[in-house]
Image (cartoon, rainbow, N blue to C red):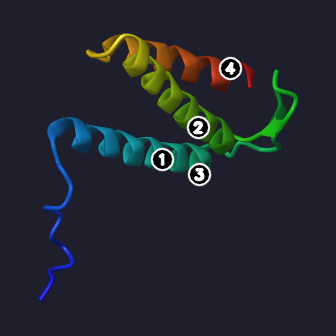
Amino acid sequence: MNNPLDLSWMAWTWPTVAFFGFIVLSIVCMAIWEKVRPGGAPRRGILGIDTTRGDRLFISYLGSGFIHLAWLGLLGTPLWGAIVVSLLFAMAVFKWV
């Protein structure tokens, strides 16, 4: 009989746990932020589209994924530089998008 909690099919390394932990933590923090200080109406940024905080978080996730893939393809490991670039990208998204 298969155990539904058996997660041995996935390589749960510390980086994997940290990655998924960060995603969950950022979504929880965003939910708390929205509950404490509602974002109000969407704002129009440099892209010319109306975005909410959640939209900007998603754009940050998506862009960071592409930044990491490009870093791996062009420079390889380690990924510390990609993390720094991704954090700067996320700050720019929340500021101007």
Image quadrant assignment for residue 3 = bottom left
Q: Which image quarter is the C terminus in?
A: top right
Mark toward the start of the polypeptide (3 vs 2): 3
Secondary-structure class at tag 1: helix
Between marks 4 and 2 in the image, the one whose residue lies nearer the viewer:
2
| Residue placed under numbered mark 2 in the picture | 57
- Check if mark 3's residue and mark 2's residue have beta carbons within 8 Å: no
- Mark 4 crowdedness (10 Å alpha carbons): few <14, some 14-19, many ≥20: few
- Residue at the image position 31 percent from the left and 14 percent from the top: 80
- The amino acid on which the numbered mark 1 sits, given as a three-letter code, is Ile
Between marks 3 and 2 in the image, the one whose residue lies nearer the viewer:
2
Mark toward the start of the polypeptide (1 vs 2): 1
Across and down, in percent, residue 53 comes to: 66, 39
Mark toward the start of the polypeptide (4 vs 3): 3
Mark toward the start of the polypeptide (4 vs 1): 1
Across and down, in percent, residue 20 comes to: 33, 45
- The alpha-carbon separation of the residues under discs 4 and 2 comes to 12 Å
- The alpha-carbon separation of the residues under discs 4 and 3 comes to 20 Å
Q: Nearer the viewer, residue 57 or 2?
A: 2
The circle drawn on residue 95 is 4
Q: Nearer the viewer, residue 86 or 71?
A: 71
- Mark 1 crowdedness (10 Å alpha carbons): few <14, some 14-19, many ≥20: some
| Residue placed under numbered mark 1 in the picture | 27
- The amino acid on which the numbered mark 2 sits, given as a three-letter code, is Leu
